[in-house]
Image (cartoon, rainbow, N blue to C red):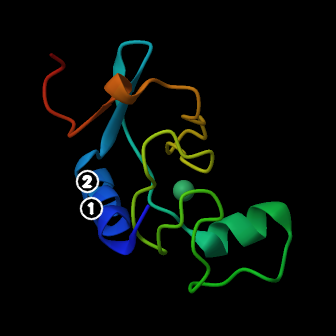
Amino acid sequence: MNARELALRTGEAQRLTHVTIAGAVIKRLPWDPAAEAEMFGVDWMDESTPCNDCGVSAGQLHWPTCDQDRTPDGSQTCGLPLEAYSDGGPAA
Ligand SMILES: [Zn+2]
């Protein structure tokens, strides 16, 4: 994947603000390396640390299906099909 494809994919991911899990539309959380560092008790992450799976920067939404993608209730979204991701509008 070249830099342009990477940027497009990251841009597209920012529009997919929600996931549907068991019929419920849930907002996704942006990558937060500081929270992640605290959760895992590591000191090598800071705000400049990109997601180690999909590479987005702090404050950006992960690419769909990224292993680090989370919802506010702590659900992990990895394993969800791409179709589960949406802009939060009414489900098709
Ligand atoms: Zn990610």
Tell me which corner region of the image, top left, top right, bottom left or bottom right, holds residue 84. top left
Q: Identify the amino acid type marked 1.
A: Leu
Q: Identify the amino acid type marked 2.
A: Glu
Question: Label 1: how many residues lie within 10 Å, few (<14), some (14-19) or many (20+)?
Answer: few
Q: How many marks?
A: 2
Q: Position of residue 50 (x, y in %)?
A: 57, 74
Q: Position of residue 26 (x, y in %)?
A: 37, 34
Q: Is there CB contact under 8 Å for labels 1 and 2?
A: yes
User: Which label sits on residue 46?
Assistant: none
Q: Is residue 68 left or right of residue 84?
A: right
Q: Position of residue 37 (x, y in %)?
A: 74, 71
Q: Residue furthest front?
A: 2
Give the position of the N terminus as an image quadrant.
bottom left
Q: Which residue is mark 2?
A: 12
Q: Is residue 34 left or right of residue 91?
A: right
Which quadrant of the figure shows ligand 1? bottom right
Tell me which corner region of the image, top left, top right, bottom left or bottom right, holds residue 79. top right
- Report helix, strand or loop for mark 2: helix
Q: Is residue 90 left or right of residue 68?
A: left
Tell me which corner region of the image, top left, top right, bottom left or bottom right, holds residue 74. top right
Q: Position of residue 76 (x, y in %)?
A: 60, 36
Residue ID at (44%, 23%)? 81
Residue ID at (50%, 42%)? 71
Q: Which residue is mark 1?
A: 8
Question: Label 2: how many residues lie within 10 Å, few (<14), some (14-19) or many (20+)?
Answer: few
Image height of 22 relative to 38, above or below: above
Residue ID at (64%, 75%)? 34
